[in-house]
Image (tube, rainbow, N blue to C red):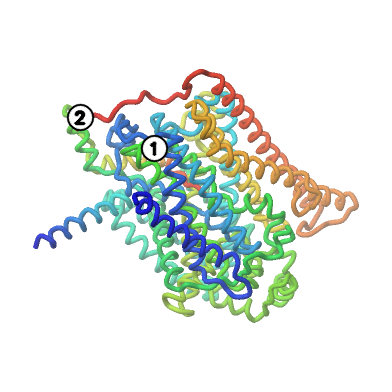
Amino acid sequence: MQAGQNLMARWKTLSKCVCDGAKLMVGQGDYAAYAEHVRRTHPDRQPMSELEFFRNRENARFGVGNTSGFRCC
Amino acid sequence: MGAISKHGPWALVGALGAAALSIVAIERGEAVNALWLVVAAVCVYLIAYRYYAKFIADKVMRLDAKRETPAVRHNDGLDYVPTNKSVLFGHHFAAIAGAGPLVGPVLAAQMGYLPGMLWILAGVVLAGAVQDFMVLFISMRRDGRSLGELIRSELGTIPGIIALFGTFLIMVILLAVLALIVVKALAESPWGTFTVMMTIPIAMLMGVYTRYIRPGKIGEVSIIGFLLLMAAIVGGGSVAAHPVWGPAFTFTGTQLCWLLIGYGFVASILPVWLLLAPRDYLSTFLKIGTIVGLALGIAVVAPHMQMPAMTKFVDGTGPVWSGQLFPFLFITIACGSVSGFHALISSGTTPKLIANEMDARFIGYGGMLMESFVAIMALVSACVIDPGVYFTMNSPAALLGTTPETAAAAVTKLGFAISPETITQTAQDVGEHTIISRAGGAPTLAVGMAHIISSAIGGKAMMAFWYHFAILFEALFILTAVDAGTRACRFMVQDLVGLAVPAFKETASWGPSIVATAIAVGAWGYFLYQGVTDPLGGINTLWPLFGISNQMLAAVALTLCTVVIFKMKRERYAFVTIIPTIWLCICTLTAGWQKIFSADPRIGFLAHADRYATALAEGKVLPPAKNADQMAQIIFNDRIDAVLAAMFIGLVLAIAAFGILSCLKALRASSWTALESDPRAVPAE
């Protein structure tokens, strides 16, 4: 039982790591971490919604004046 | 006892690596199994990571686990976020991996696999990974600033401007050569052209989906896109065989060149969510998946190397590209062992996401080792196919003619026996009209990958599918790079022109945007057109220029690293960056000099221009020119290329001179003069 739970927990950690990694590869950071950060450090501010965050990151990657989406050879 | 348990296992790894290397290098007369190359490479990487990277981290950089990184200090949840080490490794690797390490080793294979393999391994350990790691460290200690800003602040304003201008030139050449690879892969190939064209409506569909139907759902939209792509590959076979649609999707190189130029212009003005971002998902995930798949394929199939360890072409008489082993092998392999472009990535988003300084070794040095491993796999793919097929695919049409009979005779004369039937059969197997003179690396790599993967899955019946899968995978991320790169060039142009005409900087208004985009597209389009119409096949001209510019940027980045080491008063360890800097300078300067002044018209731009000029003066027309105007165009192109090579030489000399001056100044200073952000300890939880 204990071992089973342990395995489940490990699987969850691993799959979160893979998902986060895949998202970050295309410039999408961790929304939960962002929302948590804003709540903790700026309790007076309303964090962006998940969709606003997504568009913000899309623009940050390819938007005006930004070259971070540029790939190398 | 302690020393044995600490170093003992590593000694075994070293011994295994040495044994594998000696099998690869010494065995003659019998085909070597590709797995020995893989084992040798992995052992070299492990030892280098354990000892050399650790030495750099501990002694040269003195990484400090307790010191705040930019991600911790400026944490905003957006650009600066402390990120899990493995997640960040994936991000960094996806950003540095591209077409370079796949194409360079394929072209280098004309000298046999051994010279290429040795430079891929030595280069990455001593130069490439050191550069990526050092630049990451320098940027991380300076709030994640970019390479241009770092050069300006540590070396001075003028070197900063020189480096920025150089980056622009390099980008133009890079985009041209990438686009040329796509043109070479798709010319006269209706199947390939159809599947690659289908990626545009598929990406737009995905864009609309993520924008309006299910916003932000990257995972599911990528799966939908992937399935549609696979359907496009399967459908492409029927389209190519169709009596009407087949010819409709068959284009010559010149037609594809104009299509790509038009595409680049339109794609870089469209909103990012519609085309660029969704295609970025597809190309990134497909790239990582295919690399993993290729690694598994090599491990399962364990193919044998068909190419000799060394061919007679080390003397510089090879048909694929001209020039002797030194310096042109080093210029040709480029990204798989050291790539200046990585300095832009290592000073881009990655340093802003590092959670702890100690992670930098894994991400910077480790990420580049991984890229080098991709280069080794590309080399394996090119060398497991019949060398006769390799030279048929990569030699220029001027040498081979256009029929299987003339090509087989020419390649057999080169010393690699092949029959016309084998050429026809290989083309049929991969579902193409012809495989003659398909230089550019991508088709060869695709044949190699199809050979390996179809041995594991699907057999010969699936070979055409895997071939077009491989072509699609390369074309997809090259198109993404062309699109994103044109955008980046456009902003650079707007910045540069904006210095004189401030209104031009307005990135939101249409006039300047369109003009700047046209300038950017025109710049790389010019070199692309020149490459497509080049008598020697284009790659022969553009790839060395690209290699020189890329290695030169690496020399600039390593000069910056050397200056910073001197400014930190750790000059006794400066050999870590000085040795690769000097080597890269020697390679780029020699290659640049030979490209301009070599008396051999196959190598020297001016000699080539003179040959055409002499013929023109005598009223003769040399192929592929058909009239005097085209002759004049070739002469003009050669001279432009010579000027470009001269600019690269000037740039590297200027930065080296500024670097030496800065080092001497730092040496005379009595204390630390590097400009790091104030060290602050990580706050206690």
For the residue labelled by badge 1, is the local secondary structure a helix, a strand or a loop?
A: helix
For disc 2, the neighbor class at 10 Å (few under 14, some 14 to 19, many from 20) is: few
Q: Tell me if residue B133 comes above or below residue B110 in the rendering.
A: above
Q: Nearer the viewer, residue B165 or B156?
A: B156
- On residue B351, the disc is 1
Q: Which residue is farthest top?
A: B670
Q: Nearer the viewer, residue A72 or B64?
A: B64
* Chain assignment, label 2: A
Q: Position of residue B181 (x, y in %)?
A: 58, 57
Q: Position of residue B490 (x, y in %)?
A: 52, 38
Res. B403 visible in picture: no
User: Which amino acid, mark 2?
Assistant: Thr
- Specify whether B165 is left or right of B131: right
Residue, disc 2: A41
For the residue labelled by badge 2, is the local secondary structure a helix, a strand or a loop?
A: helix
- On residue A71, the disc is none
* Chain assignment, label 1: B
Q: Residue at x 76, y 54 (%)?
A: B602
Q: Which residue is farthest right?
A: B618
Spatial separation of the CA atoms under disc 1 and disc 2: 22 Å
Q: Position of residue B110 (x, y in %)?
A: 65, 63
Q: Position of residue B504 (x, y in %)?
A: 52, 28
Q: Nearer the viewer, residue B471 or B576?
A: B576
